[in-house]
């Protein structure tokens, strides 16, 4: 029971927490996919009234409301598609489009209910779009969005039901030959189904978040890894461009670290890496971003010009040198140092690859000059 309770608490906490950078970047791609699906589905909806017209099952009540809904859906789907294609991610867009999906479904149900309460409450074809809207939130990779959309669907459908029951004057108004009788039990069952679909979609989102977390973070140090750096860096450049700030990429390499692995073993080497990562992490300030690139290499991204980045990195270098790693209780401490090279955007490169190459050249220079130093410019 404790394991189940702990798992549920973690599940709930993860869903309510803002997704990390990689999830947001993937969610932006998911929003574009949803916009494309929405545009395609909106056009496909035209087939429903046409099929009813061909088969002779077209009714003015549902047909007119359905056509109005389809026309509105097609027009607005194109607007959302244009916004989703913007190069800069719009944080509010998934919330707006998801609210639109739910509210458009509710609007069509209301239009149906104005002419026939039974049609508005029992039209399963229209009601099913609540389920579609909830399911599509999984593509945005944000558990908060799933919970919001599921709650909004339940709230709006319940509000329509209350309004219908309050407005009718006789039980006959809740009956229809085509759609049956509106019953409270049926409405409660549909609300339960919306809740179940929200829970299932939230579980899928949670699972995706866990998988991305494992793929985007280094298992040894807990720091972001190269995958997350590649996905995150374009948005960091966009933020720097919008604010007029510089962006420095610092490539850090621990000096003679392989000797520790060779002389002390890989278990001690892993602990030494965690120690080094902890020293670097403790020296970070707001806006800094530390990544383990691989092996004994780290990348530190700072929204600072070259000079100030050099000063900050020099402070970290001195901290590293004065905080030796103690492998065991009675063992002699091991002094760790690092060499580093700095490259700044936009002077030294316009993308991550160029900046890392320039930072690596300066890192090599630091090693040739004796290690345990930071190089920001070629000599």
Image: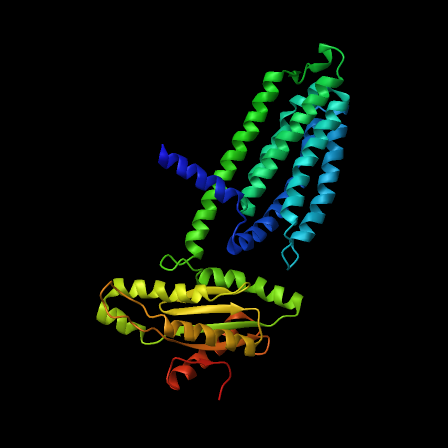
Q: Who's the residue at 62% across and 64% down the image?
A: 239
Any part of residue 119 in sight: yes
Residue 35 sits above or below residue 312 on the image:
above
- Taking depth in this image into account, of 51 and 272 the one nearest to the observer is 272
Residue 356 sits above or below residue 215 on the image:
below
- Taking depth in this image into account, of 268 and 332 the one nearest to the observer is 332
Q: Who's the residue at 48% across and 44% down the image?
A: 14
Q: Who's the residue at 51% across and 42% down the image?
A: 15
Quarter the N terminus occupies: top left
Any part of residue 126 in sight: no
- Taking depth in this image into account, of 37 and 19 the one nearest to the observer is 19
The answer to which image quadrant residue 86 occupies is bottom right
Residue 170 sits above or below residue 30 on the image:
above
Colour pattern: rainbow
The answer to which image quadrant residue 222 occupies is bottom left
Left or right: residue 347 versus residue 174 is left
Left or right: residue 2 versus residue 203 is left
């Amino acid at each position: 029971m404790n394991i189940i309770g702990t798992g549920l608490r973690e599940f709930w906490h993860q869903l309510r927490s803002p997704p990390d950078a990689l999830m947001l970047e993937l969610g932006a791609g998911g929003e574009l996919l949803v916009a494309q699906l929405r545009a395609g589905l909106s056009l496909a909806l035209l087939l429903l009234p046409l099929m009813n017209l061909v088969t002779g099952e077209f009714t003015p009540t549902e047909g007119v409301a359905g056509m109005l809904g389809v026309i509105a859906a097609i027009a607005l789907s194109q607007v959302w598609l244009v916004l989703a294609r913007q190069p800069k991610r719009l944080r509010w867009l998934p919330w707006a489009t998801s609210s639109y999906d739910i509210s458009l479904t509710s609007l069509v149900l209301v239009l149906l209910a104005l002419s026939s309460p039974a049609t508005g409450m029992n039209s399963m074809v229209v009601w099913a779009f609540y389920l579609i809207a909830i399911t599509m939130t999984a593509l945005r990779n944000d558990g908060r969005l799933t919970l919001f959309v599921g709650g909004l669907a339940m709230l709006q459908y319940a509000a329509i039901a209350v309004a219908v029951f309050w407005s009718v004057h006789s039980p006959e108004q809740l009956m229809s030959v085509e759609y049956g009788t509106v019953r409270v039990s049926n409405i409660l069952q549909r609300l339960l189904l919306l809740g179940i679909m929200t829970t299932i979609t939230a579980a899928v989102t949670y699972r995706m978040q866990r998988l991305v977390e494992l793929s985007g973070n280094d298992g040894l140090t807990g720091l972001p890894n190269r995958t997350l750096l590649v996905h995150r860096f374009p948005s960091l450049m966009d933020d720097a461009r919008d604010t007029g700030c510089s962006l420095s990429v610092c490539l850090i390499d621990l000096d003679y670290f392989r000797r520790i692995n060779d002389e002390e073993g890989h278990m001690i080497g892993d602990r030494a890496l965690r120690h080094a990562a902890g020293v670097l992490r403790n020296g970070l300030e707001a806006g800094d971003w530390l990544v383990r690139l691989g092996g004994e290499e780290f990348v530190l991204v700072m929204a600072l010009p070259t000079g100030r980045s050099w000063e900050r990195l020099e402070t970290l270098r001195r901290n590293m040198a004065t905080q030796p790693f103690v492998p065991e209780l009675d063992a002699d401490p091991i002094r760790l140092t690092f060499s580093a090279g700095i490259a700044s955007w936009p002077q030294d490169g316009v993308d991550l690859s160029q900046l890392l190459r320039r930072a690596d050249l300066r890192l090599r220079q630091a090693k040739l000059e004796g290690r345990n130093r930071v190089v920001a410019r070629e000599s």
